[in-house]
Image (tube, rainbow, N blue to C red):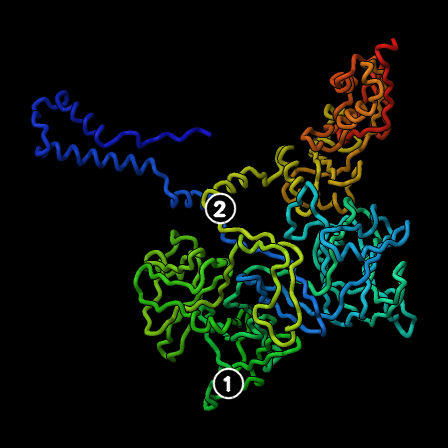
Amino acid sequence: MLKLPNLDDRMYEHMVEAARKQIPALYPAWTDENAHDPGMTMLEMLTWLIEMQQYYLNRVTEANELKFLKLLGVKPRGAVPASVEVQFEDVAEKSKLPRGTKLAAGGLIFETAEPLLLVPAIPDKLIVATDSGYFDYTASNEGRNVSFPAFGAKGETGSRLYIGFAEPLPTNQLLTLSIRLYENYPIVPVQDFEGERIPSAKLAWRMFGDGEEDRPADWQPVVLRRDETNHLSQSGKLLFRLERPMQSRIVGPASDRERYWICCEVVEPGFELPPKIEHVAFNAVTAFQHDTWSLMEEFDWDGRSGQGQSLEISHYLAFFGTVRIQVRSEDQVAWEEWREAGDLPFAVPGDKRKVYALSRNGESKTARIAFGEEAGGQAPPDGIGRVRVICHTGRFRDQRRIGTGNGLPHQRCELPCASVVAESFRLQVGEKDPVSGEWLWYDWQRVDDFDRSGPDDRHFLLDPLNGIVLFGDNEKGMAPLPSDEPNIVVISLRSTEGVSGNINAALIQRFAEPWPEVEIVHPVNRTVATGGCAPETLEEAKLRARRELQQPATAVTAEDVERIVLNTPGLRIARARALPLFRKGLKQYPSDRSPAALSVVVVPYSESPKPLPSRGFMETVRRHLDKRRMITTDIQILPPEYIEISVHAVIVVEPSFKDEASIVIRELTRLLQPFDNKDGTSGWAFGRTVYKGDIYGVINRISGVSYIQDLWISAEGKGFRKDADGDIQIPPYGLVYSGEHDIELISLTEL
């Protein structure tokens, strides 16, 4: 990178002195150079102006850098909440936790990401069945960070994982099973946010229970609602439902008593990395470190089924907090706030009563909002996003009104908290209807700056770190209209502590505000919380912009293709090789070429010495690359072809090295390695010929070797060719690995 020049390299005094020295040459009649002379005053003023221009030209402010980043489509990220899996122990009876249940870890608040049904069930037996027999791994599940193979070392067809319970699981209820896998491998995959990965193996979940039509108990399929593990290719949760009652039985070595079992069986093998389980848990849910002060959710409304319609929301704030309802007005711009039935006088006619009926279900922990006849009023008009439910904590009831509009430019309002999650923040400003006198509430939009805001745009700026809201000046963004009452209201607010939320294990120990059903239930996080990040600084945003600009978005060159493939979401790819204009079957590549063809060889990370990608693995790569390829390119994803190389050598060595053939074999194995070595040396290049000179070089560099008396190479595999010089030519998509090396050492004293 070129060094930026310093434009502000002249001091004020130096410029004045330089100008003074030029006076005799430019205007000899000017002889009075004292400070009282008007000419000197003008000279000093112009010099000051030049110095200021130099200063500003030389200075790129933070605001300038933010504008430059905006041109690149980049802006500093806000704080990111940490997440952790929380398990609930000592569950004595079935109960429901709503989404957003608040948990406490010291002074931090964590909230559950989804509803969870708590059932008195604990996996008390884990059995793995393979062709080699049954293995009991219950003790591993009770320990910490002690993994065990879910389907044996190879994950072959018919291998099974049995999970036993002391009590039967309830039927026709959505149950959650959490499975944490060992994932501490050298290659960390890109997160698969869009669910692109096709599983390498196929699994089937069953439970032992009643058969159909009075048939005897047998293994029945489990109804899966969601499989976050993607057939145990990653950690996650399994949401399932049992349609028939469970029955007890004995499985394998668990012969002490009968248990109730669910079973996971491999029906189609193909794991690149057979899964290793660290922990299996029931009654577990993901929790995020944020504190929701106010929640807003919108619902579509379809009144074709007549009056009496209702909607239901499952959230902690909806059940335990305050609920407000807004309905979009006929003009589709403003929102009207409806009242709860009973708050409006019955003198108002029914067809004009804008009311709702609120009820709460203690069993499901949901809030139900009804309209129409059931509420004794009218129903909302049809449309998408016509009804809005706002629920908040009791403490936020008065704090939600953050200001009163004054109509003046750049009005500022302070939020009741700092470290705001900007993406979830929503704001309204109320205006009274001049005819009815009722409040109409208008949504205002958060923007990064007022550059493109006009005088009629309801825009505002948010400083999430300090909790400050800033409005426009009626030229760049509208200012809130003057009001006699507080009319600037927050309808959605969430705060997070960012990186401070990355807490250690076992710090979540209680509910923030427990209710009677869960007083004896103990939440606990068995692992550390991860993912929490502090707000991104400007320097960090600039570095990220550079990294993102270096990442190829389109597969143009072979290097682009390889980088895109290596970043396929959800996959651990050890190596990738792009072969332009190559199609499998060409004999004389690269002299022979296939127009528009692009072959990509992928090697998955694996603990196997010769890893091969499954069909699902290769299809995932193909789909990921297909979105980024040139439109005329025909893509083919290939597995590597492994060629076994065996070296036969007679080596003359020093007498002290006579019994050290293992050292020679070790160095040959390091050379003939399809993967990169731990010391940083690269693995064998795709398609590179194995020359005898390579072997000579490795052996001759070993201390104790005098010279090589004889050497030849043999190979096994498909597609290789041995030339007249004894070198092994392998196909372009081929890799080599070490076979059985035959090394004979002869001491110099034996010659």
Q: Residues within 10 Å of mark 2 (few under 14, many from 20)?
A: some
Task: Find the residue positioned furthest to the front.
Answer: 656
Residue at (34%, 67%) from the top-left corner?
405
> Of tags 2 and 1, which is closer to the observer?
2
Residue 304, image x and y in percent? Answer: 60, 77
Residue at (35%, 56%) from the top-left corner?
476
Lateral position of residue 87 relative to residue 55, left or right: right
In the figure, 247 relative to 632: above or below? Answer: below
Lateral position of residue 591 relative to residue 32, left or right: right
Quarter of image, res 317: bottom right
In the figure, 610 relative to 89: above or below? Answer: above
Lateral position of residue 198 relative to residue 498, left or right: right
Residue 108, image x and y in percent? Answer: 54, 61
Q: Mark 2 points at which residue?
A: 74
Quarter of image, res 314: bottom right
Q: Can residue 391 be seen in this view?
A: yes
In terms of secondary structure, where does tag 2 sit? loop
In the figure, 1 relative to 391: above or below? Answer: above
Lateral position of residue 186 relative to residue 609, left or right: left
Residue 168, image x and y in percent? Answer: 81, 70
Q: In the rendered image, which quarter contains the C terminus?
A: top right
Q: Which label number is shown at residue 161? A: none
Q: How crowded is mark 1: few (under 14 residues within 10 Å), some or many (20 or more)?
A: few
Label 2 with label 1: CB-CB less than 8 Å: no
Quarter of image, res 432: bottom left
Residue at (90%, 63%) from the top-left corner?
255
| Real-space Cα separation, disc 2 to disc 1, in angstroms | 51 Å
Q: What residue type is labelled 2?
A: Val
Q: Name the residue under label 1.
A: 351
Q: State which tag comes first along the sequence, 2 or 1.
A: 2
Q: Is residue 442 visible?
A: no
